Amino acid sequence: MRLNRYLAAAGVGSRRKCDELIAAGRVTINGRVCTNFNAQPTERDHVKVDSELVHRERALTILLNKPPGFVSTRSDPHARDTIFDLLPPRFPRLFNIGRLDAQSEGLLLLTNDGDLAQRLTHPRFEIEKEYEVTLDRQWQSERAHKLLRGIFLDRQRAQIVRLHPIGATRLRVVLRQGINRQIRRMFYAVGYEVKRLTRVRIGNLRLGDLPRGHWRALTDSELASLNTIQKTPRGRESK
């Protein structure tokens, strides 16, 4: 197993982050700095990042129903609750796949599988994410075309892929992007404030009836469905 995959499997971070650590000379094998991306450490080798010994842990990917008020970081300078406070204290080191802002809730994936994290977060794979949105007043359907056509946020076109009402002030929204606070900002641009935002699906994974603040490990079939995600950009897939 190449060094970046070894580090990712140890929960250090995504493979891209691990590549950066290797290139910066922050990784040692048996006391020697290693910048060789093709190095393949064994179980007998001592691999360290910034002098901290790392161990490959059993692969684990979990689904968490994030409550509002929790931030999607391991630590917060403002001492707010983090999603990792919801996990058992003696748990494999996990990192979250994507984020939900503090007031948003719902489905969040955490893993120590760097390959899986990269595949689910890289924008070229365009993984669908579905949300339930509650607005501050009744939805006017004629506003939908602007959201579907796209609005420029952070110098890029932000688009909603699909949108359909499920109540007077509630909608289901599907994205294939991950721009910061995208849904809230897009609805604000057409005159609405999002009062509640819940992610209910990522790819084929659904939140289901998992209670708020609870988590569960993904089943083998769920992991298999994630691992079948195409490794080519959507625009280049065979027709």
Image (tube, helix red, strand yellow):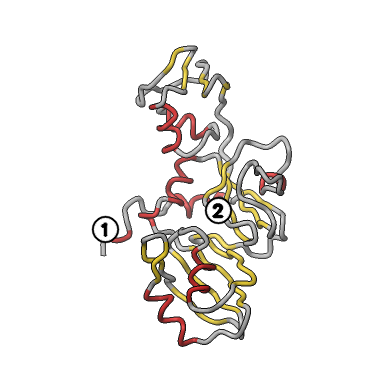
Amino acid tagged 2: Arg
- In the image, residue 60 sits, relative to residue 104, either above or below, namely above
Label 1 SS: helix
Neighbor class of circle 2 (other Cα within 10 Å; few <14, some 14-19, many 20+) is some
Closer to us: 193 or 218: 193
Q: Residue at x 42, y 64 (%)?
A: 153
Find residue 84 and report its image quarter.
top right
Residue contact at pointers 1 and 2, CB within 8 angstroms: no
Q: Position of residue 56 (x, y in %)?
A: 55, 29
Q: Position of residue 35 (x, y in %)?
A: 38, 22
Sequence order check: which comes first, mark 1 or mark 2?
2
Tell which residue pokes out farthest to the top in this image: 31
Foreground tag (1 vs 2): 2
Q: Residue at x 52, y 16 (%)?
A: 44
| Label of residue 99 in the image | 2
Q: Residue at x 46, y 66 (%)?
A: 175
| Label of residue 236 in the image | 1
- In the image, residue 159 sits, relative to residue 224, either above or below, namely below
- In the image, residue 157 sits, relative to residue 147, either above or below, namely above
